[in-house]
Image (cartoon, rainbow, N blue to C red):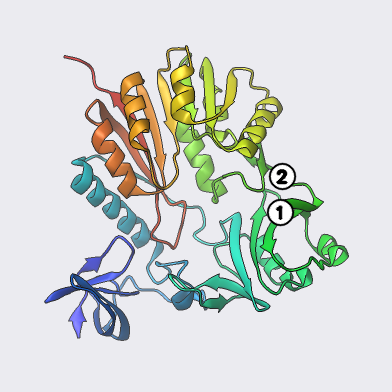
Amino acid sequence: MAKVEKLDHFGRGIVFDNKITFINYALPNEEVEYHIIKQTKKYNVANIDKIVRPSEDRINYPCPYFLKCGGCSLQHLKYAKTLEFKKAKVEEILNKYANIKTNIEVISNSSPYHYRNKLSLKIKDNHIGFYEEKTHELVEIKECLLAKEAINKLILDLKYFHLTNANVTIRASYNDELMIIITTNDEPKIDLDYLTHNHKIVGIIINYQIYYGEDKFIEIINKQLFQVSYNSFFQVNPFINAKILKIVQDNIKKNSIVADLFCGVGSLGITASLYAQKVYGIEIVPNAIKNALINKKINHRENIDFCLGDANKVLMEIKDNIDTIILDPPRSGLKKEGKDTLLKIKPDVIIYISCDPMTLARDLKELTKVYEVKKFYIADMFSNTYHVESICILNILKEK
């Protein structure tokens, strides 16, 4: 038996006993009996056999697949405590890897369940579910408590697609219109009459080709319209997305010249264009730029231009004096040339949005040689998981 000291960055309990041991689904201050499932030279990984003394913060998790699926890591912890965990995690990472200590404002989710507008599933030998974490073992499910109800309703009717083996992604818009993206070697035998009668399906895409309807739909965030293609990035949590767009809006100075890098379908740049004099959106994914150009028109924004290409190269070709840069890079963060470009241009303000605090800290370590952290937010984009979205506002240091 051992007492759990704290949580690691993945939400596992930590026990220090000769060698550090990470215990799945254990909480701080709990006394647990456990067995080792993995041993390395530096650490062990364990599962709980018995909770001898449970934490007062432990709750009954509502999902029957919680301990098998691996998609969620914090359903057994009170929601307020998950926010405390994420804040402490980001504070620790910023301090340890970037030597940054700053006040962090926490933005909670309106609902920790049924918030996701996108879900990716596996169909294996006619069974529907998720792969168990770090395996190819299928966990069969009937619903996902993180997904919107419209997505869960369709999961129950995936049998009408008659797929034996496939990857299926379901995307849902603000009004529950559905787009289904399938990759498979199976021959399509889809019961369209039943499916379109019982669900608001706007499109079915099979192996990157339109099988039915459209390959895009309209999303509405903060009274702005955004066309989203089947393979374009769009945040999975509409409520938190709206909060992030408001933060961007509030940090754009009137008459500024803005560059929105990794702009996707243009939601951040179009929001910035409400106040900016000029906005340039740069994206390397062709479908996303097509969406962005449409979104410029349907939102009647003439002060934004969208450019297809590598952000670093396009940015250096812009003749305007860029004073504000918005970044929402992939999980891997900025490449070295990206940071070098920023430090060469030296905009007055950088708004950096990140889904990985480790890569954010790595990038901030370089950027804070020239910038100071003015504001820092974490947003609970991915409730019931260890993931967290960060929004950092950087102001250039004034020369003495």
Q: Are marks 1 and 2 in contact (CB under 8 Å)?
A: yes
> Which quarter of the picture shows residue 186?
bottom right
Check disc 2 and report its element: helix, strand or loop: strand
Q: Residue furthest right?
A: 193
Work out which quarter of the rendered image holds the C terminus and state it: top left
**Can residue 50 be seen?**
yes
Q: Which residue is mark 1?
A: 179
State the residue in front, 262 or 175.
262
Residue 226 percent across, percent down from the top left: 65, 37
The location of residue 94, given as percent across then percent down, is 25, 45
Q: Amino acid at mark 2?
A: Lys
Task: Please state which amino acid type lies under the numbered disc 1.
Answer: Met
Q: For this rendering, which residue is in front, 261 or 238?
A: 261
As helix, strand or loop, the secondary structure at mark 1 comes to strand
Instruction: Please indicate whether residue 87 sits to the left or right of residue 16 in the image.
Output: right
Residue 32 at what x, y percent from top left?
Answer: 25, 83
- Say which residue appears at 62% left-offset and 33% top-offset: 289
Q: Residue at x 37, y 38 (%)?
A: 334
Q: Is residue 51 left or right of residue 387?
A: left
- The reply to whether residue 61 is in sight is no
Residue at the far left in the pictured view: 18
Q: Position of residue 385 (x, y in %)?
A: 42, 62
Looking at the rendered structure, which numbered label has been put on residue 216? 2
Instruction: Report crowding for label 2: few under 14, some 14 to 19, many 20 or more residues within 10 A (C-alpha).
Output: many
Depth check: 377 or 96 in front?
96
Residues under labels 1 and 2: Cα distance?
Answer: 7 Å
Q: On screen, 277 above or below 37?
A: above
Badge 1 or badge 2: first in the primary sequence: 1
